[in-house]
Each structure stands twice: as structure tokens, then as C-alpha cells.
Image (cartoon, rainbow, N blue to C red):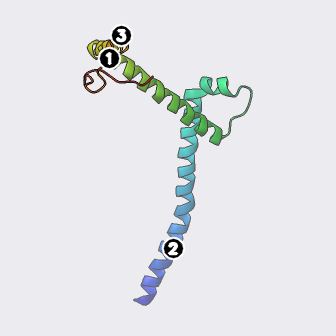
């Protein structure tokens, strides 16, 4: 009985030793494939930043992160602009408050209007 379990353990160890390099090879192939896809998708953007140079995998990843960060910032700015366009009354009210603050006489320091924005500049 002991020999059978020792034999099974040896077979299992041998299997794991053979499997590990195969799994690692497949993992590296997936990583390389994804990096190549990024390079093909963002190639023109990369050429603008580093023309005439062979890009390493780390370069491709760094440039992708930079590109996506810029894209997210642009997206956030566009959302803000869209919200302003969708809600012009809020924008108008804020502008009206600024105009009334700058044009009104501010002698009532003890009783300021809570609807008017106060800006010290």
C-alpha cells in the first residue's frame, strides 16, 4: 500500500514538474499577444511620441497607460461640458450670482445673502 501511494506521489510530482513550464509558456504567450494587440491598436499614437525607435514591451505598456489616462481626462471634461449644456439654468444662476455680487453694494456685511456666492477675489 505504501509503495502504491509513493508511486502515485512520484507520478504527481513528475506531472506537476512537466505542467509548470507549459503553464508559464502559455501565460507568457497571452501577455505577449495582448501587448502586440495594444501596439497595433495604439501604434499611430506611439509613433507620435517616439518615432523611429523600436518599442520594448515596457514602453508599450507605459505609453498605453499614459494614453488611457489622457483619454479618461478628456472624457471627464466632456462630461462636465455636457452637464453644463444640459443644465444651463444652474450655469446661468451661478453667473447671475457672480454679477450681483460684483455689482451690488456690499455694505450689509453682517447679513449676507445666502444665495450669493462669496469670493474674496
Image quarter of residue 77: top left
To which residue does mark 2 refer?
A: 13
- Are the residues at dot 2 and dot 3 in contact (C-beta closer than 8 Å)? no
Which residue matches tag 1? 94
Q: Nearer the viewer, mark 1 or mark 2?
A: 1
Q: Quadrant of the C terminus?
A: top left
User: Image check: 83 left or right of 78?
Assistant: left
Residue 40 left/right relative to 5: right
Name the residue that disc number 3 marks.
Answer: 103
Q: Position of residue 80 (x, y in %)?
A: 38, 22
Give the crowd class for mark 3: few <14, some 14-19, many >=20 residues within 10 Å.
few
Indicate left or right for 112 with 64 as reference. Answer: left
39 or 72: nearer the viewer? 72
Q: Position of residue 50 (x, y in %)?
A: 69, 28
The disc, 1 or 2, on the residue closer to the chain's N-terminal end is 2
Q: Secondary structure at mark 3?
A: helix
Work out whether residue 60 or residue 33 is closer to the camera in this orientation and state it.
60
Which secondary structure lies at badge 1? helix
Residue at 33% of width from left, 18% of height from top?
Answer: 106
Neighbour class for label 1 at 10 Å: few (<14), some, many (≥20)?
some
Amino acid at each position: 500500500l505504501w509503495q502504491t501511494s509513493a508511486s502515485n506521489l512520484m507520478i504527481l510530482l513528475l506531472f506537476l514538474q512537466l505542467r509548470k513550464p507549459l503553464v508559464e509558456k502559455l501565460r507568457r504567450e497571452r501577455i505577449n499577444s495582448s501587448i502586440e494587440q495594444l501596439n497595433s491598436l495604439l501604434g499611430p499614437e506611439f509613433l507620435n511620441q517616439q518615432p523611429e525607435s523600436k518599442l520594448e514591451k515596457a514602453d508599450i505598456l507605459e505609453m498605453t497607460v499614459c494614453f488611457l489616462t489622457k483619454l479618461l481626462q478628456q472624457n471627464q471634461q466632456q462630461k462636465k461640458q455636457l452637464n453644463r449644456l444640459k443644465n444651463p439654468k444652474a450655469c446661468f444662476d451661478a453667473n447671475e450670482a457672480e454679477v450681483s455680487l460684483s455689482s451690488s453694494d456690499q455694505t450689509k456685511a453682517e447679513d449676507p445673502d445666502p444665495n450669493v456666492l462669496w469670493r474674496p477675489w
